[in-house]
Amino acid sequence: MEWTENKSPTEGISYYDHTISETPLGTIIIEWKSWKERPSYDIMLNGEWLGVENNLPDAKTVALKHVLDKAQELITFLNNN
């Protein structure tokens, strides 16, 4: 997955620091509150919350796993129909 560079809060996109990846499933955004001593990294796909991790690399791994799982679900569906 390709991610944007880490961005500061951007009006109309995110109130928090964030990075974005465009996928065939839609837009995945990871957001965090950088002013916190230990920020959490929320993962969302098209505005729906997927989960939270303690660091950015793990959040990106969760996002990738979600996309791969959905791809496998689609392959299984297509093979059974």
Image (cartoon, grey):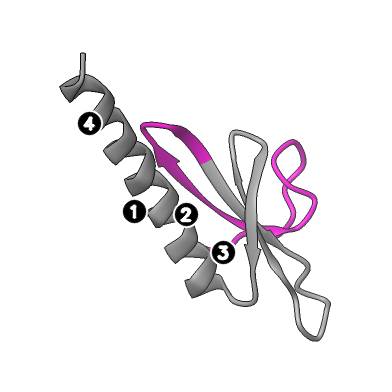
How busy is the neighbourhood of tag 3: few (under 14 within 10 Å), some, or many (20 plus)?
Answer: few
Residues at badges 4 and 1 in contact (C-beta under 8 Å)?
no
Q: Earlier in the sequence, mark 2 or mark 3?
A: 3
How busy is the neighbourhood of tag 2: few (under 14 within 10 Å), some, or many (20 plus)?
Answer: many
Q: Earlier in the sequence, mark 4 or mark 2?
A: 2
Q: Earlier in the sequence, mark 4 or mark 1?
A: 1
Q: Which mark is residue 75?
A: 4
Q: Is residue 72 magenta?
A: no
The residues tagged by marks 4 and 1 sit, at their Cα atoms, a distance apart of 19 Å
Q: Residue at x 56, y 64 (%)?
A: 6
Q: Which mark is residue 1?
A: 1
In this view, the residue in front, 45 or 80, is 80
**Which residue ends up furthest to the top in the rendered image?**
81
How busy is the neighbourhood of tag 4: few (under 14 within 10 Å), some, or many (20 plus)?
Answer: few
Which amino acid type is shown beneath numbered disc 1? Answer: Met
The residues tagged by marks 4 and 2 sit, at their Cα atoms, a distance apart of 19 Å
Q: Which residue is mark 3?
A: 6
